């Protein structure tokens, strides 16, 4: 979607923490097309304009469910491990160029495996992604950009109970390779997922859950009370329920906010109405995230620009948010301390305010 943003370039420079980004939603359009041609996969349309419509949301969807086919379509190129590595490298490099210093990147192991049509296992997918991440980090380093990348395994509820159990078993088996587990949509009553999340929690793995993105505010409270969530993906609907809102605030539950995603999926109708302003004013711990940027034709700096231009957030707000994001990250306290010192301290904030705002 096109938002006619004027300050994206400015916000590219700001150091950032990103906690909610789906690998499957990060495949750059040019790479989707190039991989179709390289792998001999027929394109969904003859003209470039029509192809773009198949992979990138050009206007807001009716709701999240309506948007999901577009969000998942590009993953067809994951039939080959080489394409997975290529995309991972590109994602990490591009994030580093936007000055993302800490990235928690998530993907659904059984989903990506299923796209390979049995050619590569979940283990191979993991190795391919890790290889790509290493390439991306090294490419960024050549440009003097530092980025730290960690993986979250997602369980995709839409694929059914067998797939969900497969994702849970996989993350437990490979817990040294992941910092957390995520449950993603489409969002139904979350009570039914406790048996899966109990296993994850018992294995000592952190939990974040997509909740109150498109349906019931109550789901966010269920995610915390029953599913061990320390963070909520989106949570935007909780502004509709004062009791749930207060519950999350009292329990200091972090909200992973993705403003452009909410507009593209049609869950928020106008940027100026986005509940991020209320959450921020009421002292919530927040992060700003891109969710599935390639499918929205956006990048993380666009989310910053949007919130700056439509909700009045400035450098000081973004520093506060990124410090909260860093604290809510699933990485070690040692790394948090280092990154805080290096990029997100109050001292650094003053330098950026001086550079940006005077
Ligand atoms: Zn998401």
Image (tube, rainbow, N blue to C red):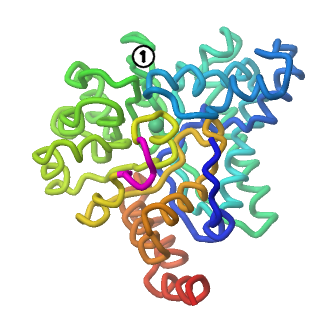
- 49 shown above or below 100: above
Pick the front one: 170 or 81: 81
Q: Quadrant of the N terminus?
A: top right
Question: In which quarter of the view is residue 327 placed?
Answer: bottom left
Front residue of 81/38: it is 38
Pointer 1 residue? 158
Residue 305 in picture, x, y percent from top left:
56, 62
Front residue of this view, candidates 304 and 96: 304
Say which quarter of the image contains residue 74: top right
* 219 relative to 8 in the view: left or right: left
- Magenta stretch contains residue 150: no
| Numbered disc 1: secondary structure | helix
Q: In this image, 198 relative to 14: left or right? A: left
> Residue drawn 51% across and 70% down?
339
Who is closer to the viewer here, 294 or 196?
294
Q: Quadrant of the C terminus?
A: bottom right
Span highlighted in magenta in the image: 269-274
Q: Quadrant of residue 99?
A: bottom right
Residue that appears at 34% across and 60% down = 277
Task: Mark 1: give few (<14), some (14-19) or many (20+) Cα within 10 Å.
Answer: few
Expressed as whole percent of the image width and height from the top left, the position of residue 159 reads 45, 13
In this view, 330 is above or below 343: above
């Amino acid at each position: 979607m096109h938002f006619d943003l004027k300050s994206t370039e400015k916000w590219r420079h700001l150091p950032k923490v990103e906690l909610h980004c789906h690998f499957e939603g990060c495949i750059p359009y040019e790479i989707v097309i190039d991989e179709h041609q390289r792998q001999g996969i027929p394109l969904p349309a003859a003209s470039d304009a029509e192809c773009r419509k198949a992979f990138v949301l050009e206007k807001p969807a009716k709701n999240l469910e309506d948007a999901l086919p577009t969000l998942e379509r590009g993953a067809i190129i994951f039939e080959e491990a080489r394409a997975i590595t290529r995309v991972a490298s590109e994602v990490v490099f591009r994030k580093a160029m936007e000055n993302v210093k800490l990235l928690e990147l998530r993907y659904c192991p059984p989903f990506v495996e299923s796209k390979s049509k049995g050619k590569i296992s979940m283990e191979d997918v993991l190795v391919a992604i890790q290889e790509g991440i290493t390439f991306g980090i090294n490419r960024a380093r050549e440009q003097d950009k530092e980025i730290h990348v960690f993986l979250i395994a997602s369980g995709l509820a839409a694929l059914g109970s067998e797939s969900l159990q497969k994702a849970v078993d996989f993350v437990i088996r490979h817990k040294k390779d992941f910092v957390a587990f995520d449950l993603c949509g489409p969002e139904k009553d979350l009570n039914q997922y406790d048996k899966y999340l109990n296993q994850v929690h018992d294995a000592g793995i952190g939990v974040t859950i997509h909740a109150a993105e498109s349906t019931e505010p109550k789901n966010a409270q269920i995610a915390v009370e029953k599913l061990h969530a320390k963070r909520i993906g989106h949570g935007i609907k909780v502004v509709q329920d004062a009791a749930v809102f207060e519950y999350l605030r009292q329990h200091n539950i972090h909200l992973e906010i993705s403003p452009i995603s909410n507009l593209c999926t049609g869950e928020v109708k106008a940027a100026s109405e986005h509940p991020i302003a209320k959450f921020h004013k009421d002292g919530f711990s927040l992060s700003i995230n891109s969710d599935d940027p390639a499918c929205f034709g956006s990048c993380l700096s666009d989310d910053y620009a949007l919130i700056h231009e439509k909700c009045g957030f400035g450098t000081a707000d973004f520093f506060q948010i990124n410090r909260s994001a860093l604290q809510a990250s699933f990485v070690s306290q040692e790394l948090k301390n280092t990154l805080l010192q290096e990029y997100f301290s109050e001292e650094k904030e003053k330098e950026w305010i001086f550079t940006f705002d005077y």
